[in-house]
Amino acid sequence: MSVQSVDRALDVLEALAEQGGQAGLSEIAARTGLPYGTIHRLLQTLLARGYVRQESDRRYALGGALLRIGGTAERMVASRAEPYLARLVEQSGETANLAMLEGDFVVYVAQVPSPRRLRMFAEVGRRVLPHSTAVGKVLLAERPDAAAVFRRTGLPRRTDRTITTVDGLLHELDEVRARGYALDLGEEEGGVHCMAVPVVDGGRTFAAMSVSGPADRIDAIDRVELASMLHKAAGDFGSAVFGL
């Protein structure tokens, strides 16, 4: 049985996260459907505990207390992901990664590198914008506010292959949903290709798992086979973490 006040407080925190970590009272109300008075009371409690802070323009933002919890959770998730990433490296010969969305940025939280001399590194802790990465596309594919995220980030061109229009990226997300995986074909870094799939928690995308490497080696792997490897690893990892 759920506790209504806890459910509502979590709704408020999730609404702030979905707005890039910061929102006004009206935006929170629009996302949660809660009355203004209820939201205000919840925010006062969250403010007092440091889970929310109020900016000078009176908008609300996620607070530092969440960083302590989130950092611990990320380390636990990263540790549990490593055997599944190692399996992907053994199967594909290429580097395997786990990434999560923090506000409008993708953060790499775990990696097992390829044993090959020429290999790809996305340093753990590195933050990148989602539009030019396979993991970012996966993490935004089911988000109703994906267009707003793209508009906020500005869509800088990383290579000559980077998609830099909101319409183009929304079409790309349609493709991700249709085929079940995302591709980065040299859009973040020239000569580097990547495939990513979602890690799902109760129907919601919690993280993205990927394999990346030099374009010629990634392209030499059958895409259906690589997608199957990734889905199996991501599914097994999700079941282990969430008991699905």
Image (cartoon, rainbow, N blue to C red):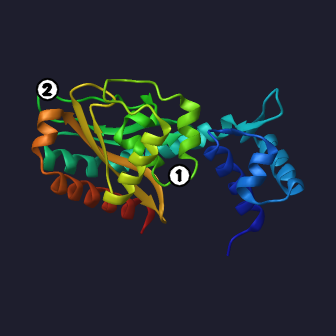
- State the residue lying farthest toward the bottom: 1
Residue 97 horizontal/vertical position (percent): 31, 41
Q: Nearer the viewer, residue 233 or 182?
A: 182
CA–CA distance in space, label 1 to label 2: 35 Å
Q: Residues within 10 Å of mark 2 (few under 14, many from 20)?
A: few
Residue 201 horizontal/vertical position (percent): 47, 61
For disc 2, the marked residue is 118
Q: Quadrant of residue 121?
A: top left
Q: Nearer the viewer, residue 200 or 141?
A: 141
Residue 228 horizontal/vertical position (percent): 22, 59
Between discs 1 and 2, the one toward the N terminus:
2
Q: Is residue 198 visible?
A: no
The three-letter amino acid code for the residue at tag 2 is Leu
Residue drawn 27% across the image and 50% down it: 83
Q: Is residue 38 visible?
A: yes
- Judged by depth in the image, the label closer to the viewer, 1 or 2, is 1
How many badges with numbers are in the image?
2
For disc 1, the marked residue is 143
